[in-house]
Image (tube, rainbow, N blue to C red):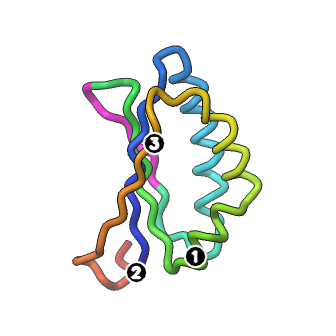
Amino acid sequence: MIVTLVHIWVKDQFVEDFIQATIDNHENTVKEPGNIRFDFISDVNDKTKFVLYEVFDSEEAVAAHKATVHYLKWRDAVADWMARPRQGLRHNVICPTDASLW
């Protein structure tokens, strides 16, 4: 499994637009073959800070996701809304290793 936590800081004036664009990206991503989880969460202490918790079953699924129309639309739409570059950090899964438990 490929797990990435994408940390995103959004300019204050674009927070609501970012949320709507990311909800659309989420709703389409969870339908992709190879997607196990795609959670969109926000920081309780900073309304401009978000995290995407992405889990895909393979590198091929990650690559396919990055080629989808909805991802490319999201990427282009939110680019100028970022307060700083987003940061995607890969993680190793320790538990659970059984994908059916996700």
Residue placed farthest to the bottom in the image? 98
Q: Which mark is residue 99?
A: 2
Q: Is residue 90 left or right of residue 73?
A: left
* Neighbourhood count class around disc 3 (C-alpha, 10 Å): few under 14, some 14–19, many 20 upward: some
Q: Bounds of the magenta span? A: 39-45
Closer to us: 99 or 3: 3
Quadrant where the image shows the N terminus: bottom left
Residue 27, percent from left and from top? 62, 51
Where does residue 41 sit, x and y in percent of width and height? 40, 42
Q: Is residue 25 above or below residue 60?
A: above
| Real-space CA distance between mark 1 and mark 2, rounded to the nearest whole angstrom | 11 Å
- Amino acid bearing label 2: Ala
- The residue that mark 1 highlights is 34
Residue identifier under label 3 = 86
| Depicted 91 relative to depicted 9: above or below | below
For residue 6: magenta? Answer: no
Instruction: Identify the residue at horizontal 36%, vertical 64% (top origin).
Output: 90
